[in-house]
Image: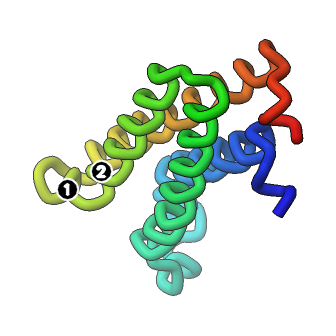
Amino acid sequence: MKFFNTQLTIDKFAGTVSLVCALQCLLMPSFFIATSGLVSLSIDNEFVHSIILLIAVPVSLFALFLGLKNHKNKLIFLIGLLGLIVLIAAFFFAKIFFGENEEILFTVLGSMMVIYAHYRNHETCKEIQCKSCHD
């Protein structure tokens, strides 16, 4: 599968999925208000969030491991891994221990960390013009 062999492509995709996760978390309450709850009755926000998370975590882990293998930059990998841990913890525990606002805060924070890690992987790949990323 040539599509998933390139570091640049997988980092762009993983970063985009993380951005969608953050935007969904931030904009879904506004969507509910704007539609006066009519459309929102059929949309389960937690279900959408879980689907995005189920896509974001494995894709991001794959991209981060590829970046670690290709670039040997442990800091980028650790930032991305910590961001994923924050995202997972926000989904499962933030609402229980804190509240919905804190869940949103932690989700956005985790997403931004993951997006930053993918951005750094992408930029590192372009800076050093590594052949393993572009094959």
The residue sitting at the top extreme is 127
Using the rendered image of the protein, determine whether residue 23 is visible from the camera's viewpoint: no
**Quadrant assignment for the N terminus:** bottom right
Quick one: label 1, few (<14), some, or many (20+) residues within 10 Å? some
Quarter of the view holding residue 130: top right
Q: How many marks?
A: 2
Residue type of the residue flagged with mark 2 = Ala
**Residue at 72% over, 28% down:** 122
Mark 2 in CB contact with mark 1 (< 8 angstroms): yes
Q: Does any portion of residue 45 appear in the rendered image? A: yes
Rendering coords of residue 89 (x, y %): 27, 51
Give coordinates of residue 99: x percent, y percent: 20, 51
Q: Is residue 75 left or right of residue 60?
A: left
Q: Nearer the viewer, residue 99 or 63?
A: 63
Q: Which residue: 44% across, 75% down? A: 47
Toward the viewer: 85 or 52?
Answer: 85
Residue, disc 2: 90
Task: Relative to 97, say whether 102 is above or below.
Answer: above
Looking at the rendered structure, the secondary structure element under dot 1 is helix
Quadrant in which the C terminus appears = top right
Numbered mark located on residue 93 in the image: 1
Mark 2 surroundings within 10 Å by alpha-carbon count, few (fewer than 14), some (14 through 19), many (20 or more): many
Q: Amino acid at mark 1?
A: Phe
Image point (73%, 21%), residue name: 123
Residues 86 and 36: in front is 86
Q: Secondary structure at mark 2?
A: helix
Which label number is shown at residue 129?
none
Colour scheme in use = rainbow
User: Whole-Å distance between the Cαs marked 2 and 1?
Assistant: 6 Å
